[in-house]
Image (cartoon, rainbow, N blue to C red):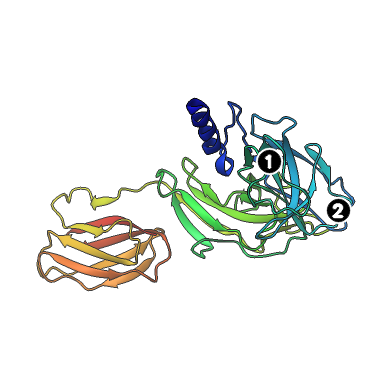
Amino acid sequence: MFHYRVLLMCLLILCAGGVARAAGNDVDGGMIAGNGGEIVAFCPGLELDQTVIFTSTSPRQDSNYFYAITTATDEPVVIEILDSNRFDFGPVNLEELRVYAISYTGNLAVVPGFPITLRPLSDGCFALSNNFVTIVMDTPEEGQLATRAGDDTITVNVESATESTVFFDLSNNPRLPQQLVVTDTNNLILSVFDNVDSLNFLGADAGACRVWGIAYAADPGAEPGTELTAELRSDGCAVRSVNFVRINRIKDPVSTGSEPGNANFARLKVYPNPVTDGQATLRLTGLRAGEPGFLQLLSVDGRPILTLPHPVAAEATLRLDLTDLPPGIYFAVYATSAGRAFTRFIVH
C-alpha cells in the first residue's frame, strides 16, 4: 500500500498543471505554425484559397493531439475543435482568430465555449502549445519605417559584432506579416527578410543601402534582383513603407591615436564608451600648455557636431552632454599646428 501511494503521488505531481509526463508517456504541445508562419493573413475581397495547414514540433501528434480555433481575446474561447491539421477559413466570418494545439491523456475537457487557457484541459495530463497561430483578415495600411530610436538614417560598423545590428519599429501593421527589404540606392532589391524586426550587417561591404518595410495580406512579390516599386499590388493587399531607413555601412576605422610621426602628441579618450545615457567624459592628456588649436566632435562623415573650449593646461577633463545626438559613431578630434589626436566613440 505504501508503494502504491508513493506512485500515485508521483503521478499527481507530474501531471499537475499540465506538466508533460504521465505514466511514462510524454504530452507535448510543441511549437506550431500555419502555412509555415505564426501569422496567416487573408485580404478582404480576394477569392483565393484560404486553406491553412498546421504543423507542429511535438513528437506526440497522434489521436490525442488536436488543433482548436479560438477567439483572439485576452481569455481565448474555443470556437471549433479541428479533426485534422488543415482547415479552410473561406466560409468563416473572421477578422482575427487564433489556433492552439493541445496534447493530452485521459478524457478531454475542452469543448466549444471553453476558455482555452482555463485548467485543467483533461482529467489526465495535458500540454497547450507553446505559441498560437494568428489568422487575420485585414488590409495593410501605409506607414513610415524607422529604427526603434526613431531614426531614418543610421551608421553601422560592418566589422563589429556589437555595432552592426539595427532594430526597426514595425508597429504600423502589428496584425499582419511584414518584410524588411534591403535595396541599393536605386531601389534594386538585394535581400528580403520575413517577419524580423532587426538586421545585422556584419561582414557586408562598406557603402550605403536602404531598408524598406512591407506589410502584406497577399504575396507582395518582392524578389532580389527586381526593382522595389511604390505599388506592389493593384488590389492594395501589400504596401511598401512611404519612406526608407538609410544605412551607412562603414568599416572599422582606427579608434584612437595620433597622426603618423606624432606618437608623443596629445592623447584623447571618451568614456564610458559606448555612451548609453547621453553623458560622457572627455579626457585630454599630453598637451602643450598655451598652444593654439581646436577641439571638436565630428559625425562619422566628418561633419562638425560640437566645438569644445580649447584647454589651457597640460591636461583637461570635460563633461559632455550628448543627449541631443542620435545613436551612431562619432569622433573627438584635437588639432594644433604640431599635429592631431583623435578617438572614436559610440552613442547608443
Q: Where is residue 245 in the image (x, y as percent from the top left)?
A: 56, 59
Q: How crowded is mark 1: few (under 14 residues within 10 Å), some or many (20 or more)?
A: many
Measure the alpha-carbon separation of dots 1 and 2: 22 Å
Q: In which quarter of the image is residue 321?
A: bottom left
Secondary structure of the residue carrying tag 1 is strand
Say left or right for 16 vs 194: left
The earlier-in-sequence mark between 1 and 2 is 2
Say left or right for 280 vs 102: left
Q: Where is residue 69 in the image (x, y as percent from the top left)?
A: 76, 49
- Position of residue 251 relative to residue 272, above or below, is above
Disc 1: which residue: 102
Q: Where is residue 247 in the image (x, y as percent from the top left)?
A: 52, 54
Q: Which mark is residue 92?
A: 2
Q: What residue is drawn where x is 43% and y is 65%?
A: 326
Q: What residue is drawn where x is 32% and y is 59%?
A: 331
Secondary structure of the residue carrying tag 2 is loop
Amino acid type of the residue tagged 1 in the rendering: Ile
Q: Where is residue 122 in the image (x, y as percent from the top left)?
A: 68, 42
Q: Quadrant of residue 58?
A: top right
